Amino acid sequence: MRSQLQQRQQQMMSYLLSGKDEIAEHVLDQGKLSAQTRLHIYGNAYHSRLRDTIDTDHPATGVYLGDSLFELMVDNYRQQHASSYRSLRHFADALPHFLAMQTPFCDNPQISELARFERLLVSTFNAADASRATIEQLRQFPVEDWPEINIDFHPSVQLFESNWNAVEIWQAIKEEKTPPTAQEDSTTWLVWRNQVLLTEFRHLGMAEFSMFKHFKSGGSFASACEALLDIEPEDQVSAIAINTLMRWLDSGLVKILSTAIKSNSKLGNTEAINLEATKLETTSPYIKAPNELFTRPKEKKS
Amino acid sequence: MDNKFLGFGLGLRTDHFVDVLEQKPDVDWFEIVSENFMVDGGKPKHFLHSIRRDYPMVMHGVSLSIGSTDPLDMSYLGKLKALAGELEPEWLSDHLCWTSVGNVNSHDLLPLPYSEEAINHVVDRVQRVQDYLGRQIFLENVSSYLSYDDSICPEWEFLSEVVQRADCFVLLDINNIYVSARNHGFDPLEYINAIDPDRVRQFHLAGHSDYGDYVIDTHDHDVADAVWELYAQSLERFGAVSTMIERDDNIPSLSVLVGELNVARDIADSTLFLEPQQVAL
């Protein structure tokens, strides 16, 4: 059985969420203000607080939609998504999904992607702090250990994979320019918080995307190079891999460089992936290229 | 818990992070909104810890929901305790209200009915929170716009009873007393004179929006003259109490806020002779 206190709280919450005014019977008329007017003060505050939260977290989405569609979005989202979070910073977490499913917004998929990009910026902003590996640390690895190098990325590092030109739309709005016409555009973006705590993002090419996926899934430098052979000319793979790694370190993307398998049979591991040593010059201004790098593994005969 | 007078503080706001570090303003301490820093990392926490090295801090929460009939949110309390472990604040406070029920959050400081059931409920929860945190907490009186027909006593009796029985302290928001007095038609001095001075450990001052028939606690204006007057009367009753100004919207420059804080200092100086105690950074 509900207590009287619980009953009042449920009635009040019901008023805020859906306007049901059962609570009004238990609110006193005082002075010039009726119970209804008093409840409206709370109702208005609730609505405007949630609206302001979406407006703050999604400024570009708001501009892109314009006033009337923005208000429609806020009203419908608020009705469908009561906040279960202690902090308002999570209130709009489901907004991209809502925009992808709800008419009229779902008819323009770039809107959902624009909102998804803005949410990702918020989560990058608040991601955990961590130390960052440096180019100097990379330089300290003996050349023979390079194939075994693993990477832990900084906790703020995220991928944004889009099917529409949502990021270009976001950029135009940010620069107070007319956003480009929406068009399909499969692109991958890398988003992270840099060493001075500013959020950065940039387009990710196929080679870098391939390396990122490999390292992210626990792969080693050697296996990342091996995967690159499907994308880049064999004689350029090592240079591309080294330059990409240097760029990541320089940008503060890497938390830890390690050779986790070092305690195992290093030689055995090298043999297992059948690497052949070669010589290659790196274009990196930061580091002298190791002499031993990699070419395509020979196919194993069954 | 010792009654420590920290002097005159401000609410730490994002707009002022850089200025606080660069200007080292004449502010005795800062109050943070705890939930704003319950994040994994990033710029806000970076500034928070940098500023903490220079100033004493207190933590002020907005979503403890101490009056809610939902179970205590131990996940939230865990984060609160962890943040307090990082910051080592002088004290922790939140509001005598409820914010959530049925796992839905209103993100507002909703008033409780002033009933025996509510007193028993809140007292029990405050005791459990204090046991978990290992320290006494401060509860702030909220501004309110409605009264329930369940209430059996005025707000000041409700507040007094809760803090006495739960053995916690009062963060007395002078502006909130003024706002609620206007909205409910009571005498603010009757409220102030009913609170036990031994329980009052902090004052809040803030601005409001006056709509004639009612007043909204907006924190987007300077402190009103009527609130300054009430502040002086509060000092006469409670003596030297750590005082801070809350500003959450239409935020002016740091120097303007320090100027407003100096008004509080002047009023306190003319009412009492004050020297802030030395506190550990």
Image (spheres, rainbow, N blue to C red):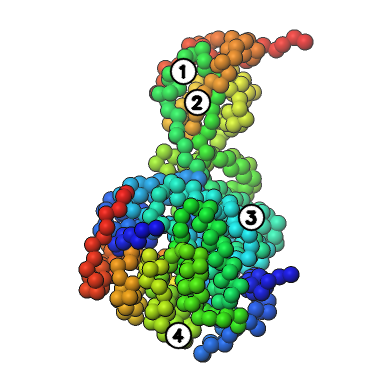
**CA–CA distance in space, label 1 to label 4:** 75 Å
Residue farthest bottom in this picture: A32
Helix, strand or loop at mark 4: loop
**CA–CA distance in space, label 1 to label 2:** 9 Å
Q: Where is mark 1, residue-wise? A: A141
Evaluate whether residue B209 shows in this view.
no
- Residue drawn at point x = 30 percent, y = 76 percent: B236
Given the image, what chain letter belongs to the residue carrying mark 3? A
Q: What label does residue B177 carry, if any?
A: none
Q: Are marks 1 and 2 in contact (CB under 8 Å)?
A: yes
Work out whether A123 lies above or below A62.
above
Task: Indicate the amino acid at tag 3.
Answer: Ala
* Residue A121, position as x, y percentages in the image: 52, 48
Work out whether B43 lies above or below A75.
above
**CA–CA distance in space, label 3 to label 1:** 44 Å
**CA–CA distance in space, label 3 to label 2:** 35 Å
Helix, strand or loop at mark 3: loop
Whether callout 4 and callout 2 share a subunit is answered no
Q: Quadrant of residue B242?
A: bottom left
Q: What label does residue B186 carry, if any?
A: 4
Q: Nearer the viewer, mark 1 or mark 4?
A: 4
Comparing B132 with A226, the one in front is: B132
Q: What label does residue A257 carry, if any?
A: 2
**CA–CA distance in space, label 4 to label 2:** 66 Å
Whether callout 3 and callout 2 share a subunit is answered yes
Q: Where is mark 3, residue-wise? A: A94
Comparing B230 with B130, the one in front is: B130
* Residue B214, position as x, y percentages in the image: 47, 83
- Residue drawn at point x = 24 percent, y = 74 percent: B271
In this picture, residue B206 sits left or right of residue A153: left
Given the image, what chain letter belongs to the residue carrying mark 2? A
